Amino acid sequence: MNTEARENAARELHEQADRMPSSLFETGELLRLIADRHIAVGGVMGEILQPHLGAGFAVLPGRRLESALHYLALGGEAPGTEDFYPCLNGGRDTEPGAAERLWPKFERLLNQKSEEISKLLEQPIQTNSPGRSDIFSWALSRGDDAPALVGPVRLLEIGASAGLAALWRSDILNEGGPRIEQRRGCDLNPIDLSQPDGRRWLKAWQAGTVAGLEKLSILDDTDWLEHMAEQAPIDQEDARTWLGKRLAEPWEGTTVVCHSFVQMYVNSEAWADIENALNERGAMATDRNPIRLIGLNSFPEPGGKARTQLRISDWVGDGVERREVFDIASGSDANPRVDPATRVVTEVPTAIPARPAAHTMPVGGQSQLRRTKPRRP
């Protein structure tokens, strides 16, 4: 790895450290130390991180690296670093200066566990924070001038990971509102929380603060985990095919589709398929069978910062998608907050997407082209 490549790698870690929320300041400091005192001087992590660098906003090599270190610490494989993590230090926030103080321990870990870290970096990103459930709860139960939910409700989550963001925490929505009678999700790589390693991996991504640790206390209740795995199953399937099948199933009541920080990991063509599935089903919605989409996503902005927004779209059978967009106030992923003052409302005419042409071979052997007519509401 030449000098220029090392400098680029160090700079990218610095940029990710700068985007860390204030609650993870020491985690950002740790990434800066890795950049300046390890990668910039020829440390092995430069080579290991190389395939993940410069690959776009959503790859997050710095987050992958610090989660890999956290994972090793949770398994007792990173001696001396326990004081850095609330889930290992007795539930205390990481003290200022901890990264600097513990740097010799982390440097030894980087050198001695480089092979294990390399394998962990290949694992899918799993930022499945249960703190986001507060956002989904608000989006489902708020009053103001939002269309009312018609019960019963089915909740479909794409990119559900372990289900903690929406599926498993939505039980609180049954208080005083339409009852959620069906919950189901999909993910290409769902986390099995019935297995200790699944819980360990999820904690490695989430429990970097006391607030995050408190939100993950539900992982210690194995009876509850078993119950929710039955109540809210997560299928291992591509969101495009899964969502189309689920939306085609009849449902008398409201269908809510939700996702959190999924769009940023999906290419534009695949996401267009997801939007088309929603749009097609939305065109058939009625006031008795409405559709609601709730989506959280981050977008890169100039200067390396990210902007997080909440989108709420409603289809109620009037030929339009009523779309609301809110900014999410800055803060940790454990406690995100909607900023109502940023609300922007637009109405988008519902268009039924064109279907692909279907080929038939009539008698006589000459090919004809028959277009499938779009269904109407």
Image (cartoon, rainbow, N blue to C red):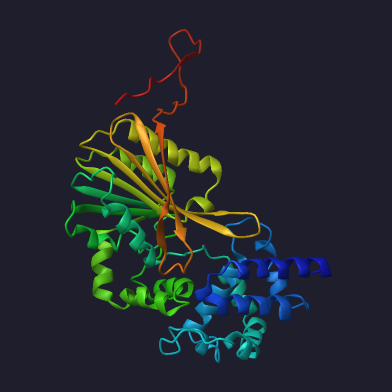
**In the image as oriented, which residue stretches furthest toward the front?**
341
Residue 328 location, x and y as percent?
45, 58
Q: Quadrant of the C terminus?
A: top left
**Which residue is pictured at 43% across the width and 83% down the height?**
87
Q: Nearer the viewer, residue 263 or 184?
A: 263
**In the image as oriented, which residue stretches furthest toward the top?**
364
Q: Is residue 271 above or below residue 78?
A: above
Q: Quadrant of the N terminus?
A: bottom right
Q: Nearer the viewer, residue 357 or 286?
A: 286
**Which residue is pictured at 42% across the width and 53% down the height?**
341
155 sits left or right of 299 in the view: left
Residue 336 location, x and y as percent?
42, 64
**Which residue is pictured at 65% across the width and 62% down the height?**
52
Q: Is residue 108 above or below residue 331?
A: below
Q: Taking the image as drawn, is residue 163 in sight? A: no
Residue 11 location, x and y as percent?
72, 68
Quarter of the view holding residue 59: bottom right
Q: How many marks?
A: 0
Q: Is residue 302 above or below residue 31?
A: above
**Which residue is pictured at 73% across the width and 81% down the height?**
37
Q: Taking the image as drawn, is residue 164 in sight? A: yes
Q: Is residue 212 above or below residue 319?
A: below
Quarter of the view holding residue 358: top left
